[in-house]
Image (spheres, rainbow, N blue to C red):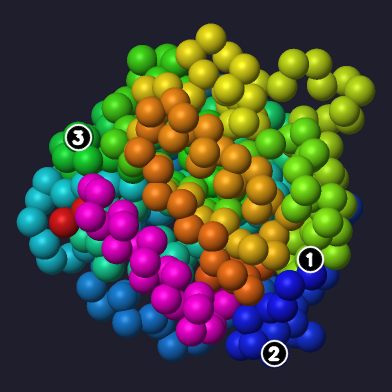
Amino acid sequence: MNSVDPELAAMLPHLPQADVSDPLAARQRIRDVFATPRGARPPSWTERVSIEHASIPAADGYLIPARVYRPIVGATPRGAMVHFHGGAFIAGDLDISEGLAGRIADTTNLLVVDVDYRLAPEHPFPVGFEDCYTALEWTVTSAADLEIDVTRLAVGGESAGGALAASVAIAARDRNGPAIAYQQLLYPVIDDSLVTRSVQELVDAPMWDAPSSRLMWEHYLGPVESRGIVSPYAAPARAAESPRGLSDLPSAYILACELDPLRDEDIAYAVALMAAGVQVELHVVPGTFHGFDGLPSHIGKRTTAEYCDALRRAVGG
């Protein structure tokens, strides 16, 4: 394996090993790493961004929790991002994504709707995906109250949240749904087939490894032998096999990590989007591993600033 960025390497002894065999335990581990400790000094953006709680009605009557991050100053109507947190489809919540959602709102002047979709294995596909799509529709129908410009609408997420953002963009096209202008996909989960070179070689990568990818898909889609045809709304790479392929999708920003088993599927998805005529900005960051931008490091701060700037230029204020 190529060398890890020195600053990140110093953190490795303090980071948990990837293990999604027990979803409840995995949820706690992710919270321990990424959630802001209660009682900690609030980040500076809290002085410039308000947080409102929302409940979005799902078709089955469930109320999907969400948080709305609204810049206190700046012209309205403003652009908006509907954001989906990471967590291997089985973990994550609004607390672990609070820092990123707030930072995005603060640096881009976007309103951010952060969605607490239902998790597998208790709620396997398509429940979480449909929660995310419902949140997109709610954001558009609430445009007047949210004071947003629906022509400047983005979806985004990291890891499994990146998969959900990509899938929501595909579904919005297929269903003649809301017009999405931009998709921000940070080291997204793209392909359930797990045949890439990076999956085969990075079996013990930091933070996320190839065996965890296999378990994640089993939690979300069930055993391989019982899956049948996998929907592109679950694994976006499958859209290449659909009648419309990857054409007519929103412009995309894709972040890949050199030492991430997902690296090659992310690069392949970027290339496939470009071949279909979609504008793509692809960044492969050397010396980094899955989720590195959530850790306090120079390379993490630099990368976060870069993708926030790209988002601001695409749909922000």
Q: Would residue 127 be seen by someone viewing this image from the given angle? A: no
Q: In front here: 222 or 281?
A: 281
- The part of the chain drawn in magenta is 294-315
Q: Which dot, 1 or 3, sits closer to the camera?
A: 1
Quarter of the image for residue 36 reads: bottom right
Quarter of the image for residue 259 reads: bottom right
Which residue is located at x 8 percent, y 56 percent? 75
Counting other residues with Cα less than 10 Å from the Cα at mark 3, is it few (<14), some (14-19), or many (20 or more)? some
Q: Which residue is mark 3?
A: 151
Dot 1 or dot 3, earlier in sequence:
3
Q: CA distance from mark 1 to mark 3?
A: 40 Å
Residue lying farthest to the top in this orientation = 243
Which residue is located at x 46 percent, y 30 percent? 275
Q: CA distance from mark 2 to mark 1?
A: 15 Å
Q: Which residue is mark 1?
A: 205
Type of amino acid under label 3: Thr
Q: Which residue is mark 2?
A: 10
Q: Secondary structure at mark 1?
A: loop
Q: Are marks 2 and 3 in contact (CB under 8 Å)?
A: no
Q: Is residue 306 magenta?
A: yes
Quarter containing the C terminus: bottom left
Q: In front here: 90 or 11?
A: 11
Q: Main secondary structure of the magenta part?
A: helix
Above or below for 29 versus 5: above
Type of amino acid under label 1: Ala
Quarter of the image for residue 261 reads: bottom right
